[in-house]
Amino acid sequence: MRRFIVVCVGIILVPCALHAGQIYGSVTSGGKPVANAAIEITCDKAVATGATASDGAYRIDVPKQGQCTLKLPRYAGGPSAVVFSYANPSQYDFELVSVNGAYRLRRR
C-alpha cells in the first residue's frame, strides 16, 4: 500500500515540476499581428522557446516560477520585457515598436 501511495504522489508531482507555469498572449506591431516571431523566455537560467502563430498569439510553458525575461531574439536590439511566471497561466500582450532602428516591446 505504501508503494502505491508513493507512485501516485510521484505521478501527480512530476508533471507539476516539469512546467511551473504558462505565459501566453499576443504580439502586434502597428495594430497588426506579428506572425512567426521566435520567442525566448528565460527564468533564472532555464530557457523556454516558442513562436507566435499567424495571428500573433503565443503560449509557452516555462519551467520555473518567478521573474522571467521574454525576448524576441531575431529583431534588432533584442527587444525584451520582464514577465512573471506563476502556477496559473499569465497573460502578456505586447506591441512591437521601432525606435531609432531598434525594436522595443511595449506592454498593452
Image: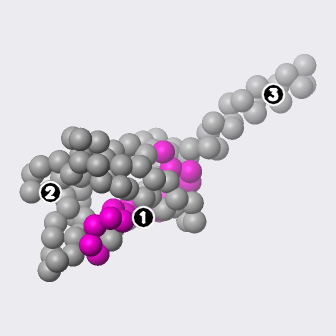
Task: Identify the residue at image location x=22%, y=70%.
Answer: 103
Name the kind of residue labelled 2 in the image: Ser
Q: In which quarter of the image is residue 98?
A: bottom left
| Disc 1 to disc 3, C-alpha distance | 35 Å
Indicate whether 64 appears above or below 76: above
Task: Identify the residue at image location x=29%, y=75%.
Answer: 77
Q: Mark 2 points at which residue?
A: 29
Q: How many labels does the image show?
A: 3
| Segment colored magenta | 61-77
Q: Is residue 36 left or right of residue 64?
A: left
Q: Position of residue 14 (x, y in %)?
A: 69, 38
Residue count near mark 1 (Cα–Cα under 10 Å), binned few <14, some 14–19, many ≥20: some
| Disc 2 to disc 1, C-alpha distance | 20 Å
Q: Name the residue under label 1.
A: 69
Q: Name the residue under label 3.
A: 7
- Residue in front for this viewpoint, 12 or 45: 45
